[in-house]
Amino acid sequence: MATAKAGMTVQIGELAKNLGITTRTIRYYEEIGLMGTSKRQGGSTRVYKKADVLRLKFILKMKALGISLKEIQELSTIFDINDQDFTMITPKLIEILDQHINMVDEKMNNLSSLRQDIVEYRDLDEEDPLEVE
């Protein structure tokens, strides 16, 4: 997988292909302020430095964890305001992740309860399956 190494750049098409996303996704993240502005090679082709690639990978990881774009925007704003110091987003990141852990736990409890209800219903007297307790 080709990614930008220190001091080098990667073009948008190659970056998108390597990360399994579309160039439109990258451009959208730029439009909504998640990525910052890309540099242009020869005035037209977008190119990205190593820091840009790492930031995009972070965004994709957050999305894979179920973090909303709005929450990622909050983290990006904190990151940019603090001269891209990752340690400055850590408290907010932990807060967001804790909220998502609680949501996942709640969903798991609800699914476990639903599963138990289904098992109990399946095990009802087979002669009268419509009789519900």
Image: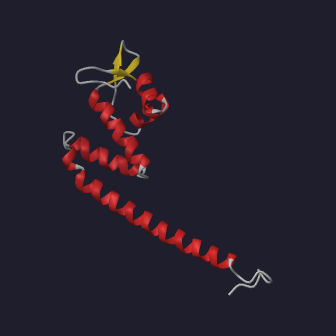
Q: Is residue 86 left or right of residue 34?
A: left
Residue at 64 percent of width and 79 percent of height: 120
The part of the image, by quadrant, that contains residue 125 is bottom right
- Which is nearer the eye, 6 or 115? 115
Q: Observer-nearest residue: 133 or 11?
A: 133
| Image coords of residue 89 (percent x, y) | 24, 50
Which percent across, then down, holds residue 62? 38, 47
Q: In percent of the image, x 38 and y 62: which residue is there?
A: 101
Q: Residue at x 28, y 57 (%)?
A: 94
Quarter location, residue 12: top left
Residue at far bottom of view? 133
- Front position in the image: 123 or 38: 123
Which residue, as the protein is rendered here, is positioned at the far top?
A: 42
Color encoding of the figure:
secondary structure
Q: Residue at x 45, y 69 (%)?
A: 106
Q: Is residue 103 above or below residue 132?
A: above
Q: Nearer the viewer, residue 17 or 89?
A: 17
Quarter where residue 31 is shown: top left
Note whether 9 is above or below 131 in the view shown: above
Q: Position of residue 47 (x, y in %)?
A: 35, 22
Would you place residue 38 above or below residue 113 in this image? Answer: above
Count the marks: 0
Q: Is residue 55 above or below residue 10?
A: below
Quadrant of the rendering where the N terminus is positioned: top left
Position of the C terminus, as image quadrant, is bottom right
Q: Position of residue 37 (x, y in %)?
A: 33, 30
